[in-house]
Image (spheres, rainbow, N blue to C red):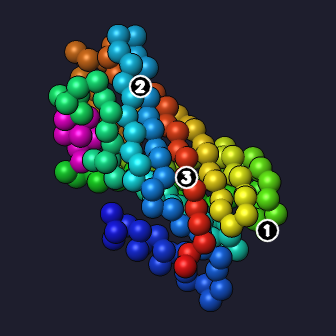
Amino acid sequence: MRKTILVLVIFFTKMTYCQIYLCRDGNTKFTSEAPLELIKAQSNRTSGVLDLSAKNVAFTVAIESFDGFNSGLQKEHFRENYMETNKYKAATFKGKIIEDVDFTKNGIYTVRAKGTFTIHGTKKEKIVKTKITVKDKEIFVETSFEVPLNDHNIKIPKVVNQKIASVIMVEVKATLKPKA
């Protein structure tokens, strides 16, 4: 995880002057609402980087950091069988904020971030609608989006297809602070 954060920081500090904001304890939740079962899990280990001058953004969360689930066996199947965390360690989004935002003024802004979402080793272009709240020297980010399992080659056996949704809802909330 630290290696991923370092790569993200290096990615965003290529310029001689950047206004970098960081987060290491953001919250990512997912919900699978299938006909026979509701599954919820979350991680409080989402890391993020925002370069205000270039409007670049990146977030990552270690798949193994998700907790919740309805049972320990369900968590084990999620990690080993579906997400294959031994091969695919994290979910990431790297992109750019499309709209202009005046990060020097407190306010609430609805923007879109366009970039690449990667999970289970499969990259997909995605535009994510995001609410950004600027308050004093902190930036609060809230977003939700869908992840179709087929788009990311996540296979669900037919025997449990009524218990696991084919489209997973993801929510991310994070507070970013200026890089010290």
Residue wearing tag 1: 104
Q: Specify whether 17 is left or right of 161.
A: right
Residue reaching furthest front?
A: 136
Q: Main secondary structure of the magenta part?
A: helix
Q: Quadrant of the C terminus?
A: bottom right
**Badge 2 amino acid:** Ser
Q: Which residues are magenta?
A: 76-85
The residue that appears at 46% across and 44% down in the rendered structure is 28
The residue that appears at 66% across and 46% down in the rendered structure is 130
Residue reaching furthest bottom?
A: 16
Label 3, label 1: how far apart the Cα atoms are: 19 Å
The reply to whether dot 2 and dot 1 touch (C-beta < 8 Å) is no
**Badge 3 amino acid:** Ala
The residue that appears at 73% across and 58% down in the rendered structure is 135
Name which quarter of the figure residue 69 lies in. top left
**Badge 1 amino acid:** Thr
Could you tell me residue 67's position as x and y percent?
A: 31, 39
Residue wearing tag 3: 174
Q: Is residue 172 above or below residue 160?
A: below
Q: Quadrant of the N terminus?
A: bottom left
153 and 112: which one is in front?
112
N-term-proximal mark, 3 vs 1 = 1
Secondary element at tag 1: loop
The answer to whether residue 70 shows anywhere in this view is yes
The reply to whether dot 3 and dot 2 touch (C-beta < 8 Å) is no
N-term-proximal mark, 2 vs 1 = 2
Q: Specify whether 15 is left or right of 147.
A: right
Circle 2 crowding by C-alpha within 10 Å: few under 14, some 14–19, many from 20: some
Is 17 magenta? The answer is no
The residue that appears at 71% across and 52% down in the rendered structure is 133
Label 2, label 1: how far apart the Cα atoms are: 38 Å
Secondary element at tag 3: strand
